[in-house]
Amino acid sequence: MRRALLWPLAALAGCAGTPVYPPRPAEAPAAPVADPTPSRVVVHATVTGAALREALEGAVPAEGEGTFPLLGKERKYSWKRDPVALRFDQGRIGVGLRIKTKADLPVGHVELPLEVRVWAEPVVGSNYVARLQSTRVEVASDDRLVKLADSVAGLLEKVKGEVQAKVDAFAYELRPLVAEAHERLAKPLPLPLEGAAGCASLRLLGVEAGPTVLADGVEKDIAFVVAPSVTLPCADEGKTFALPPLANVAAVPAGPFAVTVPVAASYPELGRAMGQAFTNGKLFFSKEYPGLYLERPEVFASQDRLVLKLHVAGPVKKMFVSTDIDGDLYLTGHPTVEDNELRIPDLEPTIETSNLLLRLKADLDGRGIRDQARAALRLDIGERVRSVRDKLASDLSFGGGKGCFRAEAHKIEVTGVHAHASYLRVYVTVTARANVDLPCATPPAPPPG
């Protein structure tokens, strides 16, 4: 009886020298590859009428002066304007100016009231500068002296030309706000993933702008074409990319957008993440032998399966038997995703491990070991990605200066998982929305924590 019990325990105690089964693939020197599909992060940009009026107030001088010929001599004139009036009509911006002009005459001077109306179409160039194109300036007055002055010296044309030059030179610089967003997108964001060191990268490939909508302000959908990825360990650390030029396109998909993020995790990182489910690195699984434990989980791939290697160790004491177990167990299965949870529902011991546990069934519960391993390998990816979502939202929401940029993720769904030779790739689809307000409607929320 005693010998019958000792033989299988001795076999397990010496199984550390058993060849690895299934065979571990050759070490791959390359880092995990996310290989993301480009997605569009659509941002709804709003420049309020008040902000545009303020910009025009700074662009059009409050006063001016010049000379005009009268009776063979150059006479001086000056003008002052009232605050800018703004309106929107049929895809154009209308700027109204009431100007009081003072012109010198041979004897004394004359004051001439003018009405200046400017019509223009707002556009944003590839250099992220908003300008007014197709401008049309109209200068009129009901004062009969204005008509007289115009016939004598072309005063209306002089004022019109001066205002036209200022409007044509108007520029609203959007690059600082976009550049700050790009700077945040370009830097890999370190992510704490419960023991695994990773980072999120949102490499910016291009910027597209849709048609302009005028509605008591200027509204425009801007799409950031990104290649998003999460790698464990971080694969893009230290890389930087230049801000691409703006491309005006016929249409940009409006509303919430969906971005598919591939999460590429090396197997050593997965093993370390799985080890976080163990207490102080050990998982005690046997009630009959409370000293037995599983430790040092290792994960690798064999064809389309994941292989889990666990080290089993600890003292076994039963009746007249007293020995120490020290060996390796191997379990394999196909990774699947169910309701944002990575699982291996068909995880089973390999043939060698099954035969060994079968010989030891009187002493060790092989099914219990399998169930414990299955439970430890159930990773709630949704919970981990939620931490990524919160970090992205806090890092990509900022304000100050001209405007505020906000990003908010909503639904997170894990849509697929594939085992590669040197890493595991999981696909996560995030539905979100983003907007930029100029000026800030409300200050952005502070980062959590």
Image (cartoon, rainbow, N blue to C red):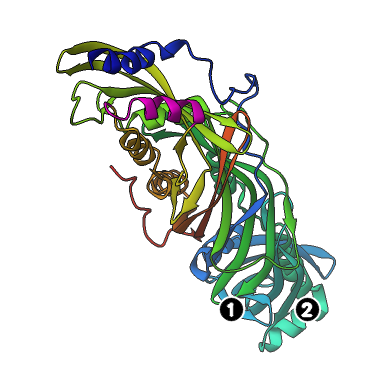
The residue shown at (36%, 28%) is 275
- Write down the residue under mark 1: 87
Residue nearest the viewer, comparing 255 with 181: 255
Left or right, 325 with respect to 402, comes to: left
Q: Is residue 139 above or below residue 51?
A: below
- Write down the residue under mark 2: 150
Alpha carbon of mark 2 to alpha carbon of mark 1: how far? 28 Å
**Mark found first going from the N terminus, 2 or 1:** 1
* Residue 400 visible in this rendered orientation of the protein: no
Amino acid, disc 1: Arg
Stretch of the chain drawn in magenta: 350-363
Q: Position of residue 84 (x, y in %)?
A: 55, 71
Residue nearest the viewer, comparing 196 with 68: 196
The residue shown at (66%, 35%) is 241
Amino acid, disc 2: Asp
Q: Quadrant of residue 185?
A: top right
Q: Which mark is residue 37?
A: none
Determine whether the residue tagged by mark 1 lies in a helix, strand or loop.
Answer: strand
Left or right, 32 with respect to 381, comes to: right
Q: Position of residue 74 (x, y in %)?
A: 78, 62
* Residue 260 visible in this rendered orientation of the protein: yes
Q: In this view, which residue lies farthest toward the front?
A: 1
Q: Is residue 202 magenta?
A: no
Q: Quadrant of the N terminus?
A: top left
Counting the numbered discs, the total is 2
